[in-house]
Image (spheres, rainbow, N blue to C red):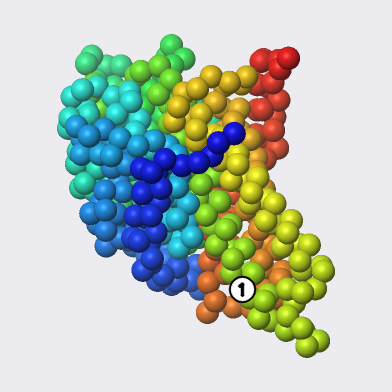
């Protein structure tokens, strides 16, 4: 395998490092000390800097003001964003834009994409179903009514729901097909209930009661939701990787300075072995991430559908990010729980990502079903 990135992909990552260089992970109140949301909105100044650096329009074609890059480039940027706990809907908005570009009508593309690429319109995606444990596409029903559509149902834990302009909602039709509905914030019949993530960010339970949308606001192309779901999952794996790399770096720095019995604890065999195990976790997370992102970006055929590669990446990311932050907390001792030190924030974000990805056992089961349906040999 050749995981060498193209010049354009490397340039995107370099631009992201420049934009995120000034971001402080502790710029908002600690989730450990805040009973509600840590902030009322996402980081709008950072969002504007991302727009100015053309990092919001990475996946858009040139005709919409974009760079025409792919999922690999997006994951490189997301990886950098997670290292500083960037509080922006970069994954959700980028993935939603990409889905509109790939499957939306010419009218919808012309109306939305250029504005979204400039950061003027912000999108998010409802991807967690009614409870967080059921498929998102079954949580909302969509029925046609003349030239429009009517939506009913509930989606839980919608990220940035209070702060974005449109929520992309997967919904099931009477003929057992999934459509993507672009629900404007404040649409008649749509309401939000406050929820909070482990990271202290405000989520929204989106309730839809006979919400009417025009035909152009619904994407009914075959495979649109499946493609968007896999891109979101792969992007979340990229966030887990970036967060894990930063946490292991913090642990390495701490262990090289913290002394016990006159020696840095990094020289102790037990510490070195645990750190080495977590390094292996990160390398496995990285390899499986790029495999999944490459399959999505290239559409290349394989022994299994791309969803198989995504499942493997999710298995490693979900368990790997948890192991990395747990080991970091252990090796930091009581210092890791100090709210004046940022490690506890990374732990809270890691738990949010782990929950968003879902349990590794479920992905292993899905992978087993794919293997049964596509025997290797």
Point out residue 182 in the picture as x, y percentages from the top left corner. Answer: 30, 32
Point out residue 149 in the picture as x, y percentages from the top left corner. Answer: 29, 22
Using residue 265 as the reference point, say whether residue 12 is left or right of it.
left
Residue 167: in sight, yes or no? Answer: no
Point out residue 30 in the picture as x, y percentages from the top left corner. Answer: 48, 71
Using residue 288 as the reference point, say whether residue 98 is left or right of it.
left
Quadrant hosting residue 215: top left
Numbered-mark total: 1
The residue positioned 34% from the left and 33% from the top of the image is 98
The residue positioned 65% from the left and 21% from the top of the image is 370
Check the picture and name the quadrant holding the C terminus: top right
Residue 255: in sight, yes or no? Answer: yes
Check the picture and name the quadrant holding the N terminus: top right
Residue at the spot of label 1: 253
Quick one: 34 or 223, which is closer to the camera? 223
Crowd class of label 1 (few under 14; some 14 to 19; many from 20; radius 10 Å): few
Point out residue 26 in the picture as x, y percentages from the top left corner. Answer: 45, 71
Using residue 330 as the reference point, say whether residue 198 is left or right of it.
left
Q: Is residue 101 above or below residue 358?
A: above
Q: Tell me the SS state at disc 1.
A: helix
Q: Is residue 157 above or below residue 180?
A: below
The residue positioned 68% from the left and 81% from the top of the image is 258
The residue positioned 24% from the left and 22% from the top of the image is 105
Furthest toward the bottom, the residue is 262
């Amino acid at each position: 395998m050749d995981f060498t990135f193209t010049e354009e992909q490397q340039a995107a990552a370099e631009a992201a490092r420049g934009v995120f260089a000034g971001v402080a992970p502790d710029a908002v109140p600690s989730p450990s000390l805040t009973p509600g949301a840590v902030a009322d909105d996402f980081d709008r100044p950072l969002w504007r800097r991302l727009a100015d650096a053309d990092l919001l329009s990475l996946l858009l074609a040139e005709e919409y003001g974009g760079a025409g890059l792919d999922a690999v480039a997006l994951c490189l940027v997301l990886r950098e964003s997670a290292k500083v706990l960037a509080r922006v809907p970069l994954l959700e908005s980028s993935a939603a834009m990409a889905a509109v570009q790939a499957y939306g009508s010419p009218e919808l593309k012309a109306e939305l994409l250029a504005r979204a690429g400039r950061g003027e319109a912000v999108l998010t995606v409802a991807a967690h179903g009614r409870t967080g444990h059921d498929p998102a596409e079954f949580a909302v029903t969509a029925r046609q009514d003349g030239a429009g559509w009517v939506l009913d149902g509930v989606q839980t834990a919608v990220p940035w729901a209070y702060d974005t302009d449109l929520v992309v909602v997967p919904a099931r039709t009477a003929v057992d097909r999934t459509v993507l509905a672009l629900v404007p914030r404040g649409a008649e019949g749509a309401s939000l209930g406050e929820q909070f993530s482990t990271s202290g960010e405000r989520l929204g339970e989106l309730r839809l009661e006979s919400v009417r949308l025009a035909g152009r606001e619904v994407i009914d192309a075959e495979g649109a939701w499946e493609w968007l779901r896999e891109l979101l999952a792969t992007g979340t794996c990229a966030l887990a990787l970036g967060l894990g790399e930063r946490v292991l770096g913090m642990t390495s720095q701490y262990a090289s300075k913290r002394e016990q019995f006159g020696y840095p604890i990094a020289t102790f065999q037990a510490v070195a072995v645990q750190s080495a195990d977590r390094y292996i976790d990160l390398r496995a997370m990285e390899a499986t991430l790029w495999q999944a992102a490459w399959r999505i970006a290239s559409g290349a055929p394989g022994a299994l559908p791309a969803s198989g590669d995504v499942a493997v990446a999710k298995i490693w990311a979900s368990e790997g990010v948890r192991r990395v932050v747990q080991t970091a907390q252990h090796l930091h001792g009581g210092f890791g729980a100090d709210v004046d030190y940022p490690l506890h924030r990374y732990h809270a974000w890691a738990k949010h990502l782990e929950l968003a990805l879902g349990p590794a056992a479920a992905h292993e089961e899905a992978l087993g079903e794919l293997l049964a349906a596509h025997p290797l040999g």
